[in-house]
Image (cartoon, rainbow, N blue to C red):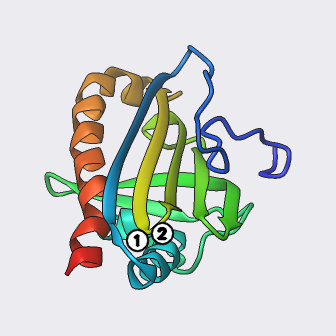
Amino acid sequence: MTASEWTTLTRPAEPVWPATDDRFRRWEGSTVLGRGGRVWDWARAEVLRWGVKTRSGFRVTPEGAAADGDRPLITAHAFGLSIKEPVEVVAVVETPDRVGFAYRTLPGHPISGEEAFIVHRASDEVTLTIRSLTRPGDSPRWRAAYPALLVAQAVARRRYLRALRQRARG
């Protein structure tokens, strides 16, 4: 299934995230990045360049802006290990007040699901929203590690919410 055939579950173009497939753990969180055009311009560019991930300690290769159908490799570094996370970008949104993208995990990823990073503004306030749907990965090894992966995911989400906020205000 290609990105254009995939129906995004995290719906980054929609301000309100409707109910989704209950086979996944659902999570959504937001943080205000700041106010004004300068914050908006910086955050909208940074989110599309995978800044939420890279500023949270992940490596994304190849570098560049997220585009529908891209299949970058995300590398997580934890406890002296490098964990490869293959993904596919399944939606990109760019409107005057909403910018972001969603990606789904591919075979070999530790978990199965989808994640979205969205920067949006209302009036002068710029906000980052993260949406995530997860369930155990397909591999028996990763299924066994799923409880530990949920803890790691909670840590990563806290980093995601801080990643652009610190720079936008700095």
Q: Is residue 57 left or right of residue 143?
A: left
Q: Nearer the viewer, residue 117 or 55?
A: 117
Q: Residue furthest top?
A: 22
Quick one: quadrant of the C terminus? bottom left
- Is residue 136 visible in the rendered image? The answer is no
Callout 1: 10 Å neighbours few (<14), some, many (20+)?
many
Callout 2: 10 Å neighbours few (<14), some, many (20+)?
many
| The quadrant where residue 19 appears | top right
| SS for callout 2 | helix
Query: x, y percentage for residue 64?
Result: 56, 80
Residue designated by label 1 = 51
Q: Residue at x 41, y 58 (%)?
A: 127
Q: Which mark is residue 99?
A: none
Q: Nearer the viewer, residue 121 or 128?
A: 121
Label 1–label 2 contact, CB within 8 A: yes
Q: Is residue 40 above or below residue 90?
A: below
Q: Which mark is residue 47?
A: 2
Q: Is residue 51 above or below residue 77?
A: below
Quick one: quadrant of the N terminus? top right
| SS for callout 1 | helix
Query: x, y percentage for residue 108?
Result: 52, 43
Q: Is residue 144 above or below residue 117?
A: above
